[in-house]
Image: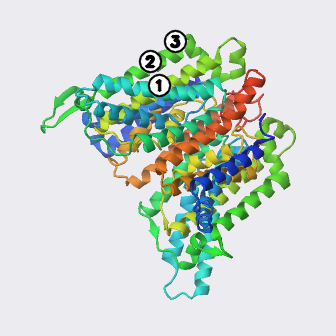
């Protein structure tokens, strides 16, 4: 909290420094249209997960089920796309089926989020536990539906969502940009956004202030599920396959991006621009390292190190300026 | 008192599960199967007890599997590189020491710099795993030192069945038993243990009554690292190889087992008995659905359902206990 005001600025500096360093380390290779486009295809999935997780973190909860929700939604969409479309279908009909599959995925995402929200508000289960359970449950349902193997063979039209470009901009990047702007608008310009911050700061106070806490929390998790299902659609469209346990490593990475972006895991604060800057920083590191042909695992170490660096700097300043007992050690 | 009841419920649930499984498939009650279940619970059990200490102290640790994998793989590589012929004792000590060392890194950030535990361990988890795979190695070590292999064959109650098959209880269970007793004594019978509970109940209050929270947190995360290291080497012993990609990814399942065992994610509460019951309930469920003839792809659904039922029931109990004076328990904020 004490370092929040300058967090965006510090992230911006970090982001520019990393971009500069990677450009200098990879002369003529990093700052090219081709590399930028390839980055544009890579980070939107993680970005969507980070947005989804940020929403729940701002309310003081957490949604651990995002990746499972995404895979479940992606699998059902892929099943529609691979099993239901008749061979004789014209392009107009295919478009109809693609829209139907996308709609189904979004409904699954929202439904998964609704279950989380109801578990938390109606049954009073702690968010981390409720979503830990549904994470296993949704993964399990996906496994039961597919029996394990990947579903593949989606129509070309759908694959454009993951691999196509529009006016030279990668389609996944557009999807992410729209989602990010949407979440930013919701958080910054709506009553609902304000309610989320209030709940995250002090749920009890929010309740006494007349905030419809339960309704806001349910909506948060529905929104989180919706965004997750978008990520699920992108994953299927990019890889042309849907699998129950795909992208498991995205979960902790998404939390890492959110936290690096200044979202307080204790709730109450966080901005979309911080999350986007954190996402870009990490993408620069991973892209730069892979251009340098460094071992792929150095990226993982660097991401962890970066997170520690970003949180340590202000803590050291705080320690030196004023010593006072902390009242909460929890993350 | 409520803990007592929760543990009885867990034990009852395990017995009901066991009875159900053995009705369908009597092989469940065979000594060989029960020994297998115990063996399967050793590594998860030790990791869960480590997590228990952190949860009771009001923190959360995501990095313990990364520490376990690092300690396991690094110690095996050192032993192989040193041409160790025995390596049983050296391996255990080395892995535990490496684990403790990595735990101290967590301790430094959490204790000395007072940073939130979730963020720190999220960062160190990436750091440890990345360093392990980038700088220590990625290949599976199959030629473990003879001493570790000998440990893997060491069995208690060894007997030969009528069919000529030899069955026995893996001696790794002794390590779990020792850790369980150790953690129970630490949490229940020592001043440090009471301080850990106090810290988890309220960090501010703990500080005000004179507990040195910085030192205590350093102790906690070092111990957790050491236990994770021990669990790591035991994993290598059980598998008879060291695979650096193992263990990581299991952290949420282990935390789920501890929570299933009745520990409070907000700190201050949790018992060794409950944790062990939680672990064995999950292990039994995991290993026995095959005996029941349930296709393996149903496993996750059952595990998810059991976790949800368990946390919903305990949330209801807490609500009932908290009312009528208190409002519904706060979501996402520490509530005692």
Q: Residue drawn 38% across and 43% down?
A: B137
**Disc 3 and disc 2: Cα gap in Å?**
10 Å
Which mark's residue is nearer the viewer, 1 or 2? 1
Residue sitting nearer the eye, A94 or A180 = A180
Position of B72 relative to B206 (above/below): below
Which class describes the residues within 10 Å of circle 3: few (<14), some (14-19), or many (20+)?
few
Residue A128, percent from left and from top: 62, 41
Residue placed under numbered mark 1 in the picture: B100
Residue placed under numbered mark 3 in the picture: B189
Looking at the rendered structure, whether the residues under marks 1 and 2 are on a common chain is answered as yes
Residue B201, percent from left and from top: 66, 22
Which class describes the residues within 10 Å of circle 1: few (<14), some (14-19), or many (20+)?
many
Q: Which chain does the numbered disc 2 sit on?
A: B
Q: Residue drawn 35% across and 25% down?
A: B92
Residue placed under numbered mark 2 in the picture: B182
**Disc 1 and disc 2: Cα gap in Å?**
16 Å
């Amino acid at each position: 909290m004490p370092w929040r005001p300058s967090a965006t600025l510090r992230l911006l500096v970090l982001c520019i420094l990393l971009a500069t360093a990677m450009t200098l380390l990879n002369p003529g290779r990093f700052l090219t249209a081709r590399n930028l486009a390839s980055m544009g295809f890579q980070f939107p999935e993680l970005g969507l997960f980070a947005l989804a997780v940020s929403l729940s973190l701002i309310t003081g909860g957490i949604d651990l089920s995002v990746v499972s929700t995404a895979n479940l939604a992606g699998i059902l969409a892929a099943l529609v796309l691979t099993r239901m479309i008749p061979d004789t279908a014209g392009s107009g009909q295919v478009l109809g089926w693609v829209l139907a599959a996308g709609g189904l995925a979004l409904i699954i995402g929202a439904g998964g989020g609704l279950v989380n929200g109801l578990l938390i508000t109606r049954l009073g289960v702690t968010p981390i536990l409720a979503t830990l359970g549904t994470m296993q449950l949704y993964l399990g349902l996906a496994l039961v539906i597919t029996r394990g193997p990947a579903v593949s063979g989606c129509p070309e039209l759908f694959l454009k969502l993951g691999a196509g470009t529009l006016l030279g901009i990668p389609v996944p990047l557009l999807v992410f940009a729209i989602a990010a702007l949407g979440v930013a608008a919701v958080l910054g310009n709506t009553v609902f956004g304000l309610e989320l911050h209030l709940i995250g700061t002090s749920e009890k106070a929010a309740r006494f202030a007349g905030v419809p806490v339960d309704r806001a929390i349910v909506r948060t998790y529905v929104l989180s599920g919706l965004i997750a299902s978008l990520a699920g659609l992108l994953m299927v469209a990019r890889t042309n396959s849907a699998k129950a346990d795909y992208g498991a490593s995205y979960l902790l990475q998404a939390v890492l991006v959110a936290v690096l972006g200044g979202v307080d895991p204790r709730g109450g604060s966080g901005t979309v621009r911080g999350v986007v800057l954190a996402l870009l920083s990490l993408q620069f590191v991973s892209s730069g390292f892979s251009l340098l042909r460094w071992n792929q695992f150095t990226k993982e170490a660097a991401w962890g190190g970066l997170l520690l660096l970003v949180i340590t700097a202000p803590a050291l300043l705080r320690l030196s300026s004023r010593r006072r007992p902390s009242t909460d050690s929890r993350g | 008192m409520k803990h007592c009841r929760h543990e009885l419920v867990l034990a009852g649930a395990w017995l009901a599960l066991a009875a159900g499984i053995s009705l369908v498939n009597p092989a469940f009650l065979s000594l060989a199967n029960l020994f297998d279940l115990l063996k399967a619970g050793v590594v998860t059990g030790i990791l869960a007890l480590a997590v228990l200490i952190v949860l009771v102290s009001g923190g959360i640790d995501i990095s313990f599997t990364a520490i376990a994998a690092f300690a396991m793989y690094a110690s095996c590589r050192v032993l192989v590189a040193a041409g160790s012929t025995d390596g049983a004792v050296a391996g255990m000590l080395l892995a535990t020491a490496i684990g403790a060392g990595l735990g101290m890194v967590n301790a430094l950030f959490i204790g000395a710099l007072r940073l939130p535990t979730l963020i720190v361990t999220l960062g160190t988890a990436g750091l440890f795993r990345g360093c392990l795979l980038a700088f220590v190695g990625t290949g599976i070590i199959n030629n473990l030192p003879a001493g570790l292999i000998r440990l893997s064959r060491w069995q208690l109650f060894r007997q030969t069945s009528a069919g000529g098959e030899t069955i026995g209880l893996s001696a790794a269970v002794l390590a779990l038993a020792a850790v369980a007793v150790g953690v129970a004594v630490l949490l229940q019978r020592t001043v440090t243990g009471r301080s850990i509970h106090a810290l988890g109940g309220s960090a501010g209050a703990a500080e005000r009554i004179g507990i040195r929270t910085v030192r205590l947190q350093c102790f906690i995360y070092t111990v957790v690292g050491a236990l994770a290291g021990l669990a790591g080497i035991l994993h290598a012993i059980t598998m008879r190889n060291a695979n650096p990609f193992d263990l990581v990814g299991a952290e949420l399942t282990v935390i789920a087992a501890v929570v299933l065992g009745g520990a409070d994610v907000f700190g201050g509460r949790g018992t060794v008995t409950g944790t062990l019951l939680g672990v064995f309930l999950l292990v039994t469920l995991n290993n026995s659905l095959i005996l029941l003839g349930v296709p393996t792809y149903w496993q996750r659904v059952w595990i998810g359902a059991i976790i949800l039922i368990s946390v919903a029931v305990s949330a209801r109990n807490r609500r009932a206990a908290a009312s009528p004076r208190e409002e519904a328990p706060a979501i996402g904020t520490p509530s005692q």
